[in-house]
Amino acid sequence: MKSLSNIGLPVEASQNIAAELNDLLANYQIVYMNLRGFHWNIKGKHFFELHLKFEELYNDALLKIDEVAERVLTLGKTPLHSFSEYIAHSQVKAVENVNDGSTAIAHILDGLAILLQKERSILDIASTANDEGTVALMSDYISQQEKLVWMLSAYNN
């Protein structure tokens, strides 16, 4: 068995990082579906602004889902790709029938807290393995999501 992958990373480290990315992927899928539900079901005096914001957020999540899945493939593994796998691996829980903006934002903040924890862990593991591709991806996600947490928290106060 060769010790380096096709992209020059240690095979064992690549497999570990890919497994962590698959876990992140599952969590992103549930966050995505929650955001779609919030977008579809939002009501109240902030309908127009939140409807648009939730659409912006689920479109962003969809891009990240694709990037994470493609990184798993780049590392030589298969991304999770069934809802049963997403549910089994996700710490983020599916939320149903939320139509209140403050409640939806609280759920989004809870999901972001889980994503940020996982991304920081992956950043650490990938950094140790000199996996700059994953490091860059996680670093970008973290900085974007920290700002989003700040903004959503300010909106909900």
Image (cartoon, grey):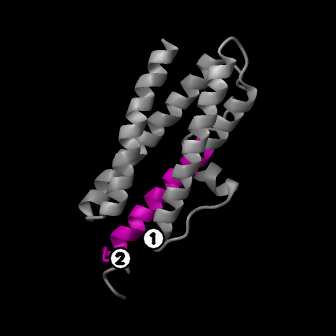
Q: Which is more toward the observer, 114 or 152?
A: 152
- The amino acid type found where label 2 is placed reads Ile
Is residue 94 in view?
A: no
Q: Is residue 41 above or below residue 102?
A: below
Identify whether 18 is placed above or below 143.
below
- Give me the disc on residue 10: none
Residue at 61% x, 40% y is 58
Residue 10 or residue 91, whichever sits in front: 10
Looking at the image, residue 99 sits to the left or right of residue 60; the answer is right
Q: CA distance from mark 2 to mark 1?
A: 8 Å
Q: Which residue is mark 2?
A: 7
Residue 147, percent from left and from top: 39, 31
Q: Secondary structure at mark 2?
A: loop
Q: Which residues are magenta?
A: 7-31
Mark 2 vs 1: CB contact within 8 A = yes
Where is residue 27 shown, x and y percent of the image?
55, 46
Crowding at mark 1 (Cα within 10 Å: few <14, some 14-19, many 20+): some
Residue 82: where, in percent of width, then height? 68, 59
Residue under the image location 70 percent in, 25 percent down: 98
State the image quarter where residue 103 is shown.
top right
Residue drawn at (65%, 36%), measured in percent from left and top?
A: 34
Where does residue 16 sit, x and y in percent of width and height? 39, 65
Q: Is residue 120 visible?
A: yes
Q: Which residue is mark 1?
A: 74
- Magenta region's main secondary structure? helix
Is residue 148 one of those drawn in magenta? no
| Residue occupying the far bottom of the picture | 1
**Residue closer to the observer: 142 or 89:** 142
Asked if residue 28 is positioned above or below residue 102 in the image, the reply reads below
Q: Residues within 10 Å of mark 2 (few under 14, many from 20)?
A: few
Q: Amino acid at mark 1?
A: Thr
